[in-house]
Amino acid sequence: MFDSTFLSRLRSKPGNVPRAGCGARPRRGRSGMTLIELLTVITIITVLAAMMFPALSKARERARAVSCMNNLRQIGLAFNMFVDDKNGKLPALGNDEIDRKGWKSSSWGAFYRLTPYFENEALLFHEPDKDKVMAASPQFLYCPSRGGPFKIRDQRPAQGLTFGGTDLAFNLGTAEVGRDIPFPRHRRDASLPFNGPLGRNTDRRSIFTDFSDGLEYTVLVSEVYAQPVERGLQRPGQIAGWVGGLPPCHTSIEPAKWATDTGRSMAIEPRPNTSGTAPPEWRAGFGSSHVSFVHTLMVGGSVRRISFDIELEVWHALGTRNGREYIDGTEF
Protein backbone atom coordinates (compact mmCIF):
# COMPACT_ATOMS: atom_id res chain seq x y z
CA MET A 1 0.00 0.00 0.00
CA PHE A 2 1.20 3.52 -0.84
CA ASP A 3 1.83 5.93 1.98
CA SER A 4 -1.05 8.39 1.73
CA THR A 5 0.77 10.85 4.02
CA PHE A 6 3.71 11.06 1.59
CA LEU A 7 1.38 11.65 -1.38
CA SER A 8 -0.49 14.37 0.44
CA ARG A 9 2.74 16.16 1.23
CA LEU A 10 3.90 15.90 -2.39
CA ARG A 11 0.67 17.48 -3.61
CA SER A 12 0.91 20.28 -1.12
CA LYS A 13 4.39 21.50 -2.19
CA PRO A 14 4.27 24.95 -3.84
CA GLY A 15 5.16 25.14 -7.59
CA ASN A 16 4.20 21.56 -8.21
CA VAL A 17 2.30 21.72 -11.56
CA PRO A 18 0.60 18.65 -13.01
CA ARG A 19 2.18 17.36 -16.26
CA ALA A 20 0.36 17.16 -19.59
CA GLY A 21 -1.41 13.89 -19.92
CA CYS A 22 -2.13 13.74 -16.22
CA GLY A 23 -5.31 15.67 -16.39
CA ALA A 24 -3.87 18.89 -17.93
CA ARG A 25 -5.11 19.85 -21.40
CA PRO A 26 -2.26 20.61 -23.87
CA ARG A 27 -2.30 23.90 -25.77
CA ARG A 28 -2.96 23.43 -29.48
CA GLY A 29 -0.70 25.10 -32.11
CA ARG A 30 -2.06 27.16 -35.02
CA SER A 31 -2.99 24.99 -38.07
CA GLY A 32 -3.11 25.89 -41.86
CA MET A 33 -1.72 29.03 -43.54
CA THR A 34 -3.07 32.47 -44.27
CA LEU A 35 -4.03 33.71 -47.73
CA ILE A 36 -0.98 35.98 -47.85
CA GLU A 37 1.34 33.05 -47.11
CA LEU A 38 -0.33 30.96 -49.82
CA LEU A 39 0.01 33.74 -52.40
CA THR A 40 3.65 34.20 -51.46
CA VAL A 41 4.38 30.51 -52.06
CA ILE A 42 2.57 30.57 -55.40
CA THR A 43 4.54 33.65 -56.47
CA ILE A 44 7.85 32.02 -55.58
CA ILE A 45 6.95 28.86 -57.51
CA THR A 46 5.90 30.93 -60.54
CA VAL A 47 9.15 32.89 -60.55
CA LEU A 48 11.23 29.70 -60.26
CA ALA A 49 9.26 28.06 -63.08
CA ALA A 50 9.74 31.10 -65.32
CA MET A 51 13.48 30.87 -64.69
CA MET A 52 13.68 27.12 -65.26
CA PHE A 53 11.50 26.57 -68.35
CA PRO A 54 13.70 28.50 -70.82
CA ALA A 55 16.74 26.64 -69.52
CA LEU A 56 14.96 23.30 -69.91
CA SER A 57 13.83 24.24 -73.42
CA LYS A 58 17.38 25.14 -74.41
CA ALA A 59 18.66 21.91 -72.91
CA ARG A 60 16.13 19.89 -74.92
CA GLU A 61 17.09 21.70 -78.12
CA ARG A 62 20.78 21.06 -77.45
CA ALA A 63 19.98 17.37 -77.03
CA ARG A 64 18.02 17.36 -80.31
CA ALA A 65 20.89 19.13 -82.09
CA VAL A 66 23.35 16.54 -80.79
CA SER A 67 21.08 13.75 -82.06
CA CYS A 68 20.91 15.46 -85.45
CA MET A 69 24.71 15.64 -85.60
CA ASN A 70 24.96 11.97 -84.68
CA ASN A 71 22.67 11.06 -87.58
CA LEU A 72 24.99 12.87 -89.97
CA ARG A 73 28.01 11.15 -88.43
CA GLN A 74 26.35 7.79 -89.11
CA ILE A 75 25.88 8.78 -92.73
CA GLY A 76 29.52 9.85 -92.89
CA LEU A 77 30.70 6.48 -91.56
CA ALA A 78 28.45 4.59 -94.00
CA PHE A 79 29.66 6.74 -96.88
CA ASN A 80 33.31 6.07 -96.09
CA MET A 81 32.71 2.32 -95.72
CA PHE A 82 30.97 2.34 -99.11
CA VAL A 83 33.93 4.17 -100.67
CA ASP A 84 36.41 1.73 -99.11
CA ASP A 85 34.48 -1.27 -100.44
CA LYS A 86 34.22 0.27 -103.92
CA ASN A 87 37.93 1.18 -104.16
CA GLY A 88 37.27 4.91 -104.04
CA LYS A 89 34.15 5.03 -106.21
CA LEU A 90 31.27 7.15 -104.93
CA PRO A 91 27.59 6.25 -104.60
CA ALA A 92 25.47 7.51 -107.46
CA LEU A 93 22.71 10.09 -107.18
CA GLY A 94 20.69 7.96 -109.57
CA ASN A 95 20.86 6.70 -113.16
CA ASP A 96 18.86 4.85 -115.77
CA GLU A 97 20.50 1.47 -115.33
CA ILE A 98 18.60 -1.67 -114.32
CA ASP A 99 19.91 -3.03 -111.04
CA ARG A 100 20.26 -6.66 -109.94
CA LYS A 101 16.62 -6.80 -108.78
CA GLY A 102 15.30 -5.60 -112.13
CA TRP A 103 14.32 -2.21 -110.66
CA LYS A 104 15.05 0.86 -112.73
CA SER A 105 17.47 2.67 -110.45
CA SER A 106 16.79 6.27 -111.49
CA SER A 107 14.55 6.45 -108.42
CA TRP A 108 17.11 4.82 -106.13
CA GLY A 109 19.58 7.41 -104.92
CA ALA A 110 22.63 7.53 -102.71
CA PHE A 111 20.83 7.13 -99.37
CA TYR A 112 19.37 3.85 -100.55
CA ARG A 113 22.79 2.70 -101.77
CA LEU A 114 24.26 3.34 -98.30
CA THR A 115 21.69 1.27 -96.39
CA PRO A 116 23.82 -1.93 -96.26
CA TYR A 117 26.21 -0.03 -93.98
CA PHE A 118 23.57 0.86 -91.37
CA GLU A 119 23.03 -1.85 -88.80
CA ASN A 120 19.34 -1.09 -88.31
CA GLU A 121 18.58 -0.52 -92.00
CA ALA A 122 20.77 -3.08 -93.80
CA LEU A 123 17.85 -5.39 -94.52
CA LEU A 124 16.19 -2.69 -96.61
CA PHE A 125 18.78 -3.24 -99.33
CA HIS A 126 17.81 -6.91 -99.56
CA GLU A 127 14.06 -6.44 -99.14
CA PRO A 128 12.31 -7.92 -102.22
CA ASP A 129 9.16 -5.79 -101.83
CA LYS A 130 9.89 -2.49 -103.59
CA ASP A 131 6.87 -0.68 -102.12
CA LYS A 132 7.94 -1.65 -98.60
CA VAL A 133 11.40 -0.20 -99.19
CA MET A 134 10.02 3.08 -100.54
CA ALA A 135 7.62 3.42 -97.60
CA ALA A 136 10.33 2.83 -94.97
CA SER A 137 11.45 5.66 -92.67
CA PRO A 138 15.11 5.21 -91.69
CA GLN A 139 15.71 7.04 -88.42
CA PHE A 140 19.03 8.56 -89.49
CA LEU A 141 17.27 10.74 -92.09
CA TYR A 142 15.32 12.90 -89.63
CA CYS A 143 16.17 15.93 -87.52
CA PRO A 144 14.55 15.73 -84.04
CA SER A 145 14.32 19.53 -83.94
CA ARG A 146 11.96 19.39 -86.91
CA GLY A 147 9.93 16.39 -85.84
CA GLY A 148 9.71 12.64 -86.29
CA PRO A 149 9.50 10.52 -89.44
CA PHE A 150 6.87 11.53 -91.96
CA LYS A 151 5.28 9.99 -95.05
CA ILE A 152 4.49 11.30 -98.50
CA ARG A 153 1.72 9.90 -100.64
CA ASP A 154 1.78 10.26 -104.41
CA GLN A 155 -1.49 11.90 -105.42
CA ARG A 156 -1.57 10.49 -108.93
CA PRO A 157 -4.52 8.07 -109.11
CA ALA A 158 -2.53 5.52 -111.10
CA GLN A 159 0.13 5.31 -108.39
CA GLY A 160 -1.19 6.00 -104.91
CA LEU A 161 2.15 4.99 -103.38
CA THR A 162 3.53 5.96 -99.97
CA PHE A 163 7.12 7.15 -99.57
CA GLY A 164 9.22 7.80 -96.49
CA GLY A 165 10.39 11.42 -96.29
CA THR A 166 13.77 12.86 -95.33
CA ASP A 167 15.10 16.02 -93.64
CA LEU A 168 18.50 15.62 -95.31
CA ALA A 169 19.78 15.88 -98.87
CA PHE A 170 22.99 15.53 -100.85
CA ASN A 171 24.81 18.55 -102.24
CA LEU A 172 24.23 18.92 -106.01
CA GLY A 173 26.68 21.82 -106.32
CA THR A 174 26.17 25.46 -107.21
CA ALA A 175 24.28 25.30 -110.52
CA GLU A 176 21.51 27.88 -110.50
CA VAL A 177 17.95 26.65 -110.58
CA GLY A 178 16.70 27.28 -114.12
CA ARG A 179 19.84 29.26 -115.08
CA ASP A 180 23.32 27.74 -115.33
CA ILE A 181 22.13 24.14 -115.50
CA PRO A 182 18.37 23.71 -115.00
CA PHE A 183 18.06 20.75 -112.63
CA PRO A 184 15.20 19.02 -114.47
CA ARG A 185 17.41 18.56 -117.54
CA HIS A 186 19.89 16.37 -115.65
CA ARG A 187 17.62 13.40 -115.81
CA ARG A 188 17.16 13.70 -119.56
CA ASP A 189 20.72 14.70 -120.43
CA ALA A 190 23.51 12.71 -118.77
CA SER A 191 26.17 14.95 -120.33
CA LEU A 192 25.28 17.77 -117.94
CA PRO A 193 27.54 17.29 -114.89
CA PHE A 194 26.89 18.40 -111.34
CA ASN A 195 29.79 20.26 -109.73
CA GLY A 196 28.90 18.78 -106.35
CA PRO A 197 30.54 15.66 -104.89
CA LEU A 198 28.33 12.95 -106.44
CA GLY A 199 27.44 12.13 -110.02
CA ARG A 200 24.73 10.30 -111.94
CA ASN A 201 26.61 7.02 -112.19
CA THR A 202 28.65 4.99 -109.71
CA ASP A 203 31.71 4.70 -111.94
CA ARG A 204 32.01 8.37 -112.92
CA ARG A 205 33.70 9.84 -109.83
CA SER A 206 36.43 8.75 -107.43
CA ILE A 207 37.22 10.16 -104.02
CA PHE A 208 40.94 9.98 -104.87
CA THR A 209 40.87 12.06 -108.06
CA ASP A 210 37.87 14.38 -108.18
CA PHE A 211 38.28 16.54 -105.06
CA SER A 212 40.92 19.16 -105.72
CA ASP A 213 39.22 21.46 -103.20
CA GLY A 214 39.81 19.00 -100.35
CA LEU A 215 37.49 16.49 -98.72
CA GLU A 216 36.94 18.64 -95.63
CA TYR A 217 36.13 21.68 -97.78
CA THR A 218 33.31 20.06 -99.76
CA VAL A 219 29.80 19.52 -98.37
CA LEU A 220 28.35 16.05 -98.91
CA VAL A 221 25.01 16.16 -97.02
CA SER A 222 23.12 18.88 -95.21
CA GLU A 223 19.72 19.61 -93.71
CA VAL A 224 17.09 20.85 -96.15
CA TYR A 225 15.01 24.00 -96.05
CA ALA A 226 11.34 23.19 -95.48
CA GLN A 227 8.49 25.24 -94.11
CA PRO A 228 6.94 23.34 -91.17
CA VAL A 229 3.47 23.37 -92.73
CA GLU A 230 4.88 21.78 -95.89
CA ARG A 231 6.72 18.92 -94.25
CA GLY A 232 5.21 15.84 -95.76
CA LEU A 233 2.68 17.86 -97.74
CA GLN A 234 1.21 15.90 -100.63
CA ARG A 235 1.91 17.40 -104.03
CA PRO A 236 1.97 16.08 -107.58
CA GLY A 237 5.57 15.17 -108.38
CA GLN A 238 6.60 14.47 -104.80
CA ILE A 239 7.32 10.85 -105.46
CA ALA A 240 10.98 10.29 -104.68
CA GLY A 241 11.06 10.31 -100.89
CA TRP A 242 14.21 9.09 -99.16
CA VAL A 243 15.04 6.58 -101.90
CA GLY A 244 15.17 9.26 -104.61
CA GLY A 245 18.17 10.70 -106.36
CA LEU A 246 17.61 13.11 -109.22
CA PRO A 247 14.51 15.32 -109.47
CA PRO A 248 11.54 13.27 -110.67
CA CYS A 249 10.53 15.87 -113.30
CA HIS A 250 6.94 14.66 -113.46
CA THR A 251 5.33 18.05 -113.16
CA SER A 252 5.62 21.56 -114.54
CA ILE A 253 5.37 22.98 -111.01
CA GLU A 254 9.01 23.75 -110.34
CA PRO A 255 8.99 23.92 -106.50
CA ALA A 256 7.17 20.61 -106.21
CA LYS A 257 10.22 18.77 -107.49
CA TRP A 258 12.28 19.81 -104.52
CA ALA A 259 10.30 19.15 -101.41
CA THR A 260 11.33 15.52 -101.02
CA ASP A 261 14.19 14.77 -103.42
CA THR A 262 17.56 13.83 -101.98
CA GLY A 263 19.56 16.50 -103.81
CA ARG A 264 19.59 20.25 -103.16
CA SER A 265 21.45 23.27 -104.52
CA MET A 266 24.17 25.27 -102.77
CA ALA A 267 23.60 28.17 -105.13
CA ILE A 268 21.09 29.32 -102.52
CA GLU A 269 22.25 30.43 -99.08
CA PRO A 270 21.12 28.29 -96.10
CA ARG A 271 18.08 29.58 -94.23
CA PRO A 272 16.20 28.81 -91.02
CA ASN A 273 12.92 27.01 -91.57
CA THR A 274 10.12 29.54 -91.48
CA SER A 275 6.35 29.66 -91.58
CA GLY A 276 4.39 31.72 -94.05
CA THR A 277 5.05 32.63 -97.66
CA ALA A 278 8.52 31.93 -99.06
CA PRO A 279 10.00 32.29 -102.57
CA PRO A 280 9.76 29.01 -104.52
CA GLU A 281 13.52 28.80 -105.09
CA TRP A 282 14.16 28.49 -101.35
CA ARG A 283 12.79 24.95 -101.54
CA ALA A 284 15.72 24.01 -103.75
CA GLY A 285 18.23 24.85 -101.01
CA PHE A 286 19.39 23.90 -97.54
CA GLY A 287 18.26 25.05 -94.10
CA SER A 288 17.30 23.80 -90.66
CA SER A 289 15.00 24.15 -87.66
CA HIS A 290 17.93 25.11 -85.43
CA VAL A 291 18.11 28.67 -84.20
CA SER A 292 21.21 29.97 -85.96
CA PHE A 293 22.96 27.20 -87.88
CA VAL A 294 22.64 24.30 -90.28
CA HIS A 295 24.43 20.98 -89.85
CA THR A 296 26.62 19.85 -92.72
CA LEU A 297 28.47 16.60 -93.31
CA MET A 298 31.72 17.08 -95.21
CA VAL A 299 33.01 14.49 -97.67
CA GLY A 300 35.93 13.81 -95.31
CA GLY A 301 33.52 12.71 -92.57
CA SER A 302 33.42 15.67 -90.16
CA VAL A 303 30.13 17.32 -89.17
CA ARG A 304 30.11 21.10 -89.02
CA ARG A 305 27.66 23.65 -87.63
CA ILE A 306 27.59 26.39 -90.24
CA SER A 307 26.05 29.72 -89.32
CA PHE A 308 23.21 31.16 -91.36
CA ASP A 309 25.37 34.29 -91.53
CA ILE A 310 28.04 32.57 -93.63
CA GLU A 311 29.20 34.59 -96.62
CA LEU A 312 27.47 33.39 -99.78
CA GLU A 313 30.82 33.21 -101.59
CA VAL A 314 32.17 30.84 -98.94
CA TRP A 315 28.98 28.74 -99.06
CA HIS A 316 29.37 28.45 -102.84
CA ALA A 317 33.00 27.39 -102.46
CA LEU A 318 31.97 24.63 -100.02
CA GLY A 319 29.46 23.42 -102.60
CA THR A 320 32.00 22.56 -105.32
CA ARG A 321 34.39 19.61 -105.32
CA ASN A 322 36.92 21.08 -107.78
CA GLY A 323 36.22 24.80 -108.03
CA ARG A 324 39.76 25.59 -106.79
CA GLU A 325 38.47 28.35 -104.52
CA TYR A 326 40.57 29.28 -101.50
CA ILE A 327 38.68 28.91 -98.22
CA ASP A 328 40.00 29.96 -94.83
CA GLY A 329 38.99 27.34 -92.26
CA THR A 330 37.86 30.11 -89.88
CA GLU A 331 35.26 31.34 -92.37
CA PHE A 332 32.80 28.51 -91.74
Image (cartoon, rainbow, N blue to C red):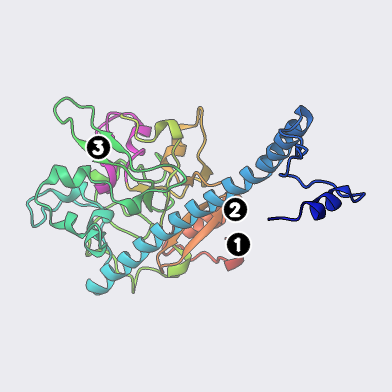
User: Quadrant location of residue 237?
Assistant: top left
Give the labeled residue for mark 1: 331
Position of residue 157 measured from the top left corner of the image (x, y, whole percent): 17, 24
Front of the two marks 1 and 3:
3
Q: Which secondary structure, mark 2?
A: loop
Tell me the distance, in whole angstroms, between the alpha carbons under discs 3 and 2.
33 Å
Give the labeled residue for mark 2: 311
Q: Which secondary structure, mark 3?
A: loop
User: Split into 4 quadrants, where in the image is the C terminus?
Assistant: bottom right
Position of residue 48 measured from the top left corner of the image (x, y, whole percent): 69, 43
Residue at the spot x=45%, y=50% of the render?
Answer: 266
Instruction: Identify whether 152 is placed above or below 138.
Output: above
Mark 3: which amino acid? Ile
Task: Say whether disc 1 or disc 3 marks the residue closer to the N-terminus.
Answer: 3
Q: Is residue 119 left or right of residue 173?
A: left
Q: Is residue 295 left or right of residue 248?
A: right
Residue at the spot x=18%, y=30% of the render?
Answer: 160
Instruction: Identify whether 301 is placed above or below 223.
Output: below
Position of residue 242 measured from the top left corner of the image (x, y, whole percent): 28, 47
Q: Specify start and end residues of the magenta stretch as a single range.
A: 235-261
| Residue 246 appears in the rendering | no
Give the labeled residue for mark 3: 239
Q: Count of labels shown?
A: 3
| Residue 315 appears in the rendering | yes
| Residue density around tag 2, few if under 14, some if 14–19, many if 20 or more, within 10 Å | few
Residues at discs 1 and 2 in contact (Cβ within 8 Å) = yes
Tell me the distance, in whole angstroms, between the alpha carbons under discs 1 and 3.
37 Å
